[in-house]
Image: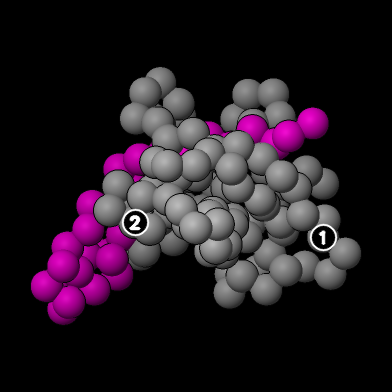
Amino acid sequence: MSLSDEKYLLLTTFRRDGTPVATPVWVVPLEGDTFGFATSSKSGKAKRLAHTHRVTVQASDVRGRVKPDSPIQEATAQLTTGAEYPIIKQKLQAKYGVMVSITKFLGLVGGIIKRKPMPYADLGVVITPST
């Protein structure tokens, strides 16, 4: 099974000082060996990816607990709002169905409660594993 077939991946991005920050994400296959996910332009992931494209990915569960014997894969990640973005959104909807609407609603409610609204999945991220 390839990483793009997993339900969740643990994506590790890196701060400017090199500190790793791991976050579980949904993932969908794209062309070739690339895969992608969507995130908010206000998220920490997007901010970290704006200054470094280096990431690692590993199969995980919804809480980010790594699956046993799952290898860490070095990769690069590119933010996109271009041609790949609508494809990523469409594939996420097809793979995760009603969960997309539920997480969008919960994000909206959380933004209202915290008085800090965030756009929902307005950026695509294309991940290319290192060979």
Q: Count residues near mark 1 (Cα–Cα under 10 Å), then give few for <14, some for 14-19, many for 20+.
A: few
Q: Residue at x 71, y 44 (%)?
A: 74
When asked about the image quadrant of residue 64, the answer is bottom right
Residue picked out by circle 2? 43
| Residue 121 shown in magenta | yes
Vertical order, 96 against 91 (above or below): below
Q: Residue furthest bottom?
A: 113
Q: Residue at x 60, y 47 (%)?
A: 55
Where's the C terminus, which quadrant? top right
Label 2–label 1 contact, CB within 8 A: no
Q: Residue at x 66, y 40 (%)?
A: 75
Q: Amino acid at mark 2?
A: Ser
First in sequence, mark 2 or 1: give its number: 2
Q: Amino acid at mark 1?
A: Ser
When asked about the image quadrant of residue 30, the answer is top right
Q: Residue furthest right?
A: 69
Residue 24 place in picture, x, y as percent: 56, 63
Provide the residue span drawn in magenta.
104-131
SS for callout 2: loop
Residue 112 place in picture, x, y as percent: 14, 72
Vertical order, 23 against 80 (above or below): below
122 vs 125, left or right, is: left
Residue picked out by circle 1? 70
| Residue 16 shown in magenta | no
When asked about the image quadrant of residue 77, the answer is top right
Q: Nearer the viewer, residue 65 or 19?
A: 19
Q: Residue at x 46, y 53 (%)?
A: 16
Residue 35 place in picture, x, y as percent: 61, 37
According to the image, what is the colour scheme of the structure?
A: one colour
SS for callout 1: loop
5 vs 90, left or right, is: right
Residue 120 shows up from this direction = no
